[in-house]
Structures are given as C-alpha cells and as structure tokens.
Image: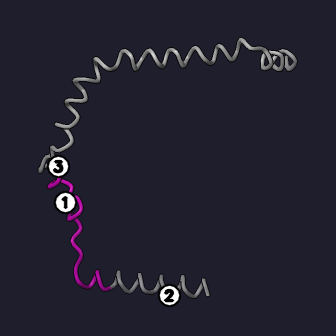
Amino acid sequence: MSPASSSSHKSVPPRSHTVQPTTNNISFPEMNPSSAGPSAAQRPKRAPTPPPPSSRASLRKQYEQIPMSEEERIEAEQVKARKAKETLAEWN
C-alpha cells in the first residue's frame, strides 16, 4: 500500500487531476455574472435599510427585564473592586 501511494505522488496524473477542479471553479464564475448582475443591484438597496424598530425594542426589553436598584449597583461595584484587588495581589 505505501509503495503505491509514494509512486502515485511522484507520477504526473494526480497533478493534472488537481488542475481539473480549478477549471470547474472557473466555469462557475462564468455562469455567475448573469445571476450576479441582479443580486449586485439588490445589495446596495439592502444595506442602507435599518433593522425594523420592533426587533430593536424587543432587544431593549430583553436587556431591561432585570432592573438594578442603586444598592445592587453599589454591591456590584464593590465586588468588582474586590476582584480587581485580588487579581492585583496575585500579580504582585
């Protein structure tokens, strides 16, 4: 098995075989320009359109579902400060 694989590596046919797929890939772009024309015209139209406001509102609602009180914010800040001090102590 191994000698056959090494001989196939040295032989030229596999190389020509690798060239064939590239020719197939080239044929695809030749076919695309006709289809790419209308799609290219559509792309600029799609880009400027902003996302619908409903989706933005739903996203905002998802984030605002958990309102934080001032006490919770202070606690969170204290926890962050503690973690920062711990990491600094570890680094030093």
Label 3 to label 1, Cα distance in Å? 9 Å
Read off the residue under disc 3. Answer: 55
Numbered range of the magenta stretch: 55-74
Give neighbour class at mark 1: few <14, some 14-19, many 20+ (Cα, 10 Å).
Answer: few
Label 3 to label 2, Cα distance in Å? 40 Å
Where is residue 89 shown, x and y percent of the image? 57, 88
Read off the residue under disc 2. Answer: 85
Where is residue 45 shown, x and y percent of the image? 16, 37
Q: How is the image coloured?
A: one colour
Looking at the image, which is closer to me, 72 or 52?
Answer: 52
Q: Is residue 5 left or right of residue 40?
A: right
Counting every numbered tag in the picture gives 3
Read off the residue under disc 1. Answer: 60
Q: Residue furthest right?
A: 3
Up the image or down, 37 lies above or below 67; here it is above
Amino acid at dot 3: Ser
67 falls in the magenta region: yes
Label 1 to label 2, Cα distance in Å? 33 Å
27 falls in the magenta region: no
Q: Earlier in the sequence, mark 3 or mark 1?
A: 3
> Which residue is located at x 80 percent, y 19 percent?
10
Q: Is residue 10 left or right of residue 71?
A: right
- Disc 3 to disc 2: CB gap under 8 Å: no
Q: Give the main secondary structure, helix, strand or loop, of the magenta stretch.
A: helix
Q: Earlier in the sequence, mark 3 or mark 2?
A: 3
Give neighbour class at mark 3: few <14, some 14-19, many 20+ (Cα, 10 Å).
Answer: few
Where is residue 29 shown, x and y percent of the image? 40, 20
Q: Secondary structure at mark 3?
A: helix
Amino acid at dot 1: Arg
Quarter of the image for residue 18 reads top right
Up the image or down, 59 lies above or below 32; here it is below
